[in-house]
Amino acid sequence: MTFSPVHSLHHISTHTSELRHIDPQHNLGDADLLHQIGYKQELRRHYSTIQVFGIAFSIMGLLPSISSVLTSGLEAGPAGLVWGWLIASCFIFCVGLSMSFMGSAIPTSGGLYYYTNYYCPDRYRVALSYFIGCANSLGLTGAICSITYGFAVEVLSAVSISKDDNFEQTNAKTYGVFAAGIVSNMVIACLTTKHAAKFQTVSICVNVFLVILFIIAVPVGFSKHNTFNSKGYIFGKWENYRDWPIGWSSVMSWNPAIWTIGSFDSVIHCSEEALNAQRSIPVGILGSIAACGLLGWVIVIVCAACIKDGDTARIIASDTGSSMAQIIYDALGKKWAVAFMALICVGQYLMAISLMIALSRQVWSFARDDGLPVMYKWVKYVDPKIKVPVRATIFAGVCGLVLGCLCIIPGTAGANALFSLGIASNTLAWVTPVILILLPYGRKRFIPGPFYFGKTATMFINIITSLFLSFIITMSMFPESRHVDKESMNYTCAINGGVWLLSILYYYSWAWRTYTGPKSNLDGSESEEESSVNNIDEVIEVKA
């Protein structure tokens, strides 16, 4: 038998699961729409609309997140931080609109890789959806690593302040706290859905309390012994603490908003546990982005106003290891700074738990479709008694522990990679289905759900989203310095590029045998209850 690469590629491209007809405008409820999508209702639906909002709002964890990345924003000066946050927030809201259009139409835990498979031409859909499934899983893993790393840094910063800076923060100590955080998050995320849903309500209250406390306490404390910086300083003082030109340095100061107001696709990954998912998903995504965008802008303005003596360089180079910790210390003194940082640590910890829940659902849904590169048969099992993907949660936690080893690398390069890693892979996963819907093939297949702005407005929003996200992917690969060495190298391009390349090679060499795209897990009797039209191409021909 003669081996033919062309014939083999053709065979692989036709080894696909059947595309189902999904009409989000005609269904009898959440379970019925999930049946149209092709899945059984395996997880319990306990998340109310406010709790769905809580998933994204908790993951964004406004004040703890800003504390983790404040230094990056200040490297273009206070004006770079303030205006960078506002500009990036507006673009991110457009991204949220695009995600909401898709989530309202097809609410499934698979989310982005499912949308990619559904809106992509047949020849490429399975390979591309496999690639996006791997990228999204990597991105969420990177996100939980960066959040937990931020938690570890904040814990050690509080210790440093309490010991009057007589404490050495090492990468090994940071990883130790990081590992403890990941393991405990993993255990808590294995709780039943009912308890996890209640947990989101608690998390909302904690995050709102932290924001209110910061906005009131820090300015009041600062004003007792210092003078606020002028509005000219806050909104017009551009500085450059990078060796990039000031223009590019200012753009890189968008990163605090991009990293903080991120992972809102987690709402989609939890959609199979949400009540009235088609409506609660847009509320969760857009509500969390709007709340964090506006409140975050207030927080960064307060930070800029309370930089002691307007000395940005001193804040960036703080011995505490955290710019936020130094600002709070200058305003409130040692004891209150330690207490405040402890509260921020609690908020950061709650963020990580919420994201661990979302990551486990993404991993579980990918394994359910036999897409996870390893152990997918073991990972996709759900105990019918508790209806929680415990094995997927354990798998996600172990992946986080392994990827988190980057923070052991000497210098800050490894730690910085954890932050940009999540941005790059998640952004790629977000932009791909949006671009596909803009193309003729995907545009014909797209049937909107109840959240929709009409054909023209939706297309305009999707174009802005595509351009912005494509730019962000490129920006996230840039190192902090033009003069790159092993300690300033941005390892994001190497890690992401390596995983992306390996996922494609693995698909064409082996995974195509097991992964044929999202596949229905309904049995025969359940499938017969669905519409007799399962091939979406037939529907397109009828519409045409």
Image: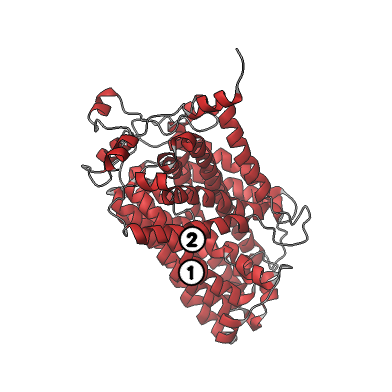
Residue 527 falls left or right of residue 56:
left
Distance in Å between CA atoms under marks 1 and 2: 9 Å
Looking at the rendering, in which quadrant would you find the N terminus?
A: top right
Q: Nearer the viewer, residue 227 or 81?
A: 81
Q: Is residue 57 at least partly visible in the picture?
A: no
The residue under label 2 is 261
- The circle on residue 33 is none
Residue under the image location 62 percent in, 39 percent down? 501
Circles 1 and 2 in contact, beta carbons < 8 Å:
yes
Q: Quadrant of residue 473?
A: bottom right
- Name the image colouring: secondary structure
Q: Residues within 10 Å of mark 2 (few under 14, many from 20)?
A: many
Classify 196 as above or below 478.
Answer: above
SS at badge 1: helix
**How far from the left and from the top, in percent, is residue 115?**
41, 43
**Amino acid type of the residue tagged 1 in the rendering:** Gly
Classify 325 as above or below 151.
Answer: below
Q: Residues within 10 Å of mark 1 (few under 14, many from 20)?
A: many
The residue under label 1 is 296
Looking at the rendering, in which quadrant would you find the C terminus?
A: top left
Residue under the image location 56 percent in, 64 percent down? 256
Sooner in the amino-acid sequence: mark 1 or mark 2: 2
**Amino acid type of the residue tagged 2 in the rendering:** Ile
